[in-house]
């Protein structure tokens, strides 16, 4: 079961359990089921002391905005992206593509190599590229 399906099943289980246990005013209770837990009607759920925000501290830190990729990065990755784009257009990943990409990423650092290789892997997993190599695909 995929993580998404598991989350959906858990959500539905919670909804059904809430319905059967009679959560809220006027709810029905299944005979023989556990007793309903009544919470104070304050408009919010109580927090445990360990999860409550400390006095004077913000409850969440704002996330920094994602900066666009620097121009030099796109220039560095362009040869590899061109090879991958040509392969995507044909729908095939051949020995020639693997050799060309290997040469294109030779001078790149680890994160840049990973970006290009992840594009090939993602396209392969999405069935947009068929691997037709006689050796390692990349």
Image (cartoon, rainbow, N blue to C red):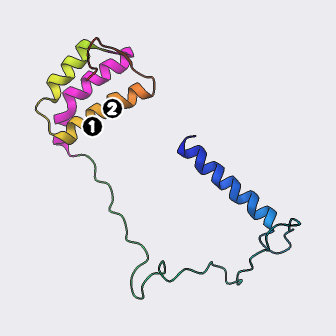
The tag on residue 119 is 2
Tell me: residue 75, above or below residue 21: above
User: Which of the two residues, 28 or 85, is positioned nearer the viewer here?
Assistant: 28
In this picture, residue 86 sits left or right of residue 75? right
Q: Main secondary structure of the magenta part?
A: helix
Highlighted range, magenta: 70-93
- Dividing the picture into quarters, in which one does residue 103 lie? top left
Q: Quadrant of the N terminus?
A: top right
What secondary structure is found at the residue carrying circle 2?
helix
**Any mark on residue 115, and which?**
1
Q: Residue furthest front?
A: 32
Residue 96 x %, y %: 23, 13
Within the magenta stretch, is there residue 86?
yes
Identify the residue at the far right of this view: 31
- Across the whole image, how many numbered discs are drawn on residues? 2
Quarter occupied by the C terminus: top left
Extreme residue in the bottom direction: 55
| 62 and 93: which is toward the camera | 93
Residue contact between numbered discs 2 and 1, judged by CB atoms under 8 Å: yes
Residue 3: x and y, percent? Answer: 53, 45
Q: Residue at x 19, y 17 (%)?
A: 99
In 3D space, how far apart are the residues under numbered discs 2 and 1 (Cα atoms)?
6 Å
Q: Is residue 32 above or below residue 47?
A: above
- As rendered, which of 58 and 23 lies closer to the eye? 23
Instruction: Give residue 90's mark.
Output: none
Kindly identify the residue that appears in the image at 64 percent across and 53 percent down.
10
Element assignment for label 1: helix
Q: Is residue 88 magenta?
A: yes
Residue at x 54% of width, y 80% of height: 48
Relative to residue 22, is residue 85 drawn left or right?
left
Left or right placement of residue 63 versus residue 17 in this view = left
């Amino acid at each position: 079961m995929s993580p998404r399906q598991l989350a959906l099943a858990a959500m539905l289980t919670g909804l059904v359990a809430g319905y059967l246990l009679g959560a809220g005013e006027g709810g029905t209770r299944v005979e023989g089921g556990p007793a309903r837990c009544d919470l104070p009607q304050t408009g919010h759920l109580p927090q445990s002391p360990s999860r409550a925000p400390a006095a004077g501290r913000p409850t969440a830190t704002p996330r920094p905005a994602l900066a666009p990729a620097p121009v030099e990065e796109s220039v560095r990755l362009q040869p590899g992206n061109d090879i991958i784009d040509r392969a995507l257009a044909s729908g095939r990943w051949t020995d020639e593509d693997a050799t060309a990409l290997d040469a294109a990423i030779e001078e790149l650092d680890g994160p840049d190599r990973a970006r290009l290789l992840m594009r090939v892997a993602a396209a392969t997993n999405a069935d947009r590229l068929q691997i037709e190599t006689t050796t390692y695909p990349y």
